[in-house]
Image (cartoon, grey):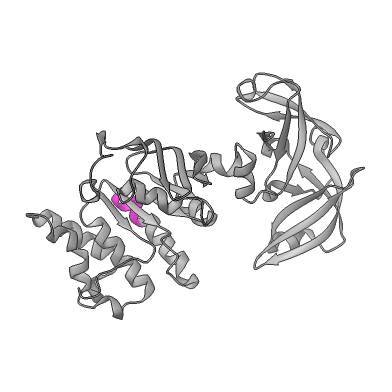
């Protein structure tokens, strides 16, 4: 277990404030946030390159807060990879082992497994200047893992790789972590990378972790408006709590002019009757209906008209205007195949459903 507890740190006027992160053995934890949110500063603090004002860092129960970087059992792969230019691939990979007083045949056998898994056998005698971006990334990973670190840390691991190679390297890293059961912390600004690689995800904004949790919970149930907005969710509406039950909440919406019930396992812990809230739904969870809705499903079904269509490769984003008394727009994401099957075109009249099971609730910002 890797634990950051109540970490505070400062560089210039920027502060990391009350950072709590726990990474289970063999898990991949991703910290995601925009540029300038403190991601790399947090990594440098964890590694020991930056001093802390307060807090504790523990690795497998050992307090390493006061230890220098070389005693923390952490392997770090920075954005620019930083292979040693005067060493061959083989020498780069074995660099950490060569610093030890001794290493044995088991260590070399493990390095051999890494070399085979990462398909490096054919380039072991080359120098970094003669490698492609993908090859350099694979060598850096092998070097980082060769010493069997307690924690592997990757800072924006795809930033130096051509877009055409990113999917290949992304899959390779996922397979690598699953094969070697390596406890890993990754920071990135890319949401696709975070949800592809992370078992758990933390969102950092302005030096603070605003939400942390399992991947699916983060995706479907953001807990604050800043988290929802960072996740790119645009279908957000004002509401009011009308009634609380054990596992559900009844909401009224002035935007939609409807009252409806939403499942919520922690209703009484998070909300009170009469409270102003926001609620939202992901664009891919808004459904276009091909048939008349059943009475049970009709509470949040609306007539709508397509006002804009944005094409992004095989995905389409529709901006539809609901047939409500006051103008309300909703975004819907559809795959190209679904667009063609449904016959959706600009200006088309639709029926759309906002299924309450896919709606998440947020407290109104203070």
Residue at point 65%, 19% (across, down): 246
Locate residue 266, reporting x and y percent: 60, 24
**In which quadrant of the rendered view does residue 296 lie?**
top right
Residue at point 22%, 60% (across, down): 113
**In which quadrant of the rendered view does residue 89 lie?**
bottom left
Q: Main secondary structure of the magenta part?
A: helix
Locate residue 363, reporting x and y percent: 67, 32
The reply to whether residue 341 is visible in this rendering is yes
Taking depth in this image into account, of 294 and 64 the one nearest to the observer is 64
Query: Does 122 lie within the magenta span?
Result: no
The reply to whether residue 344 is visible in this rendering is no
Quadrant the N terminus occupies: top left
Name, please, the residue furthest toward the bottom. 130
Taking depth in this image into account, of 28 and 273 the one nearest to the observer is 273
Q: Is residue 188 left or right of residue 105?
A: right
Residue at point 84%, 64% (across, down): 346
Name, please, the residue furthest toward the right. 325
Image height of 217 relative to 80, above or below: above
Taking depth in this image into account, of 195 and 16 the one nearest to the observer is 16
Taking depth in this image into account, of 334 and 183 the one nearest to the observer is 183
Q: Is residue 57 left or right of residue 70?
A: right
Quadrant the C terminus occupies: top right
Locate residue 289, reporting x and y percent: 79, 48
Q: Is residue 3 left or right of residue 324?
A: left
Image height of 164 relative to 17, above or below: below
Query: Does 179 lie within the magenta span?
Result: yes
Q: Is residue 149 left or right of residue 301?
A: left
Residue at point 74%, 48% (across, down): 287
Locate residue 160, reporting x and y percent: 42, 69
Residue segment shown in magenta: 176-180
Name, please, the residue furthest toward the front. 12
């Amino acid at each position: 277990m890797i634990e950051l507890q109540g970490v505070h740190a400062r560089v210039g006027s920027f502060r990391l404030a009350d950072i709590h992160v726990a990474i289970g053995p063999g898990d991949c934890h991703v910290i995601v946030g925009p540029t300038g949110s403190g991601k790399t500063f947090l990594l440098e603090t964890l590694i020991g390159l930056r001093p802390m004002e307060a807090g504790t860092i523990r690795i497998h129960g050992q307090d390493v807060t006061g230890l220098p970087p070389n005693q923390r059992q952490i392997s770090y792969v920075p954005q620019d990879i930083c292979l040693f230019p005067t060493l061959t691939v083989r020498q780069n990979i074995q660099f950490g082992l060569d610093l030890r007083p001794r290493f044995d045949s088991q260590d070399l056998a493990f390095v051999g497994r890494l070399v085979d898994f990462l398909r490096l056998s054919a380039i072991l005698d080359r120098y970094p200047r003669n490698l492609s971006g993908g090859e350099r990334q694979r060598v850096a990973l092998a070097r980082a893992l060769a010493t069997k670190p307690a924690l592997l840390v990757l800072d924006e691991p795809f930033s130096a790789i051509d877009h055409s190679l990113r999917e290949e390297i992304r899959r390779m890293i996922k397979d690598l972590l699953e094969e070697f059961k390596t406890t890993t912390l990754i920071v990135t600004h890319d949401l696709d990378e975070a949800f592809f690689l992370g078992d758990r995800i933390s969102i950092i904004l302005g030096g603070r972790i605003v939400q942390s949790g399992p991947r699916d919970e983060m995706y479907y149930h953001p807990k604050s408006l800043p988290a929802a907005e960072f996740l790119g969710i645009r279908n957000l509406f004002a509401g009011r709590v009308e009634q609380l039950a054990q596992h559900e909440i009844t909401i009224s919406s002035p935007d939609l002019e409807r009252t409806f019930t939403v499942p919520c396992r922690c209703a009484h812990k998070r909300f009170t009757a009469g409270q102003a809230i926001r609620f939202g739904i992901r664009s891919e969870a808004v459904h276009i209906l091909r048939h008349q809705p059943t009475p049970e499903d009709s509470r949040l079904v609306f007539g709508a008209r397509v006002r804009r269509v944005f094409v992004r490769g095989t995905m389409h984003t529709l901006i539809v205007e609901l047939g409500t008394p006051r103008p309300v727009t909703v975004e819907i994401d559809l795959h190209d195949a679904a667009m063609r099957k449904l016959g959706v075109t600009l200006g088309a009249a639709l029926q759309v459903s906002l299924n309450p099971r896919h709606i998440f609730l947020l407290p109104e910002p203070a």
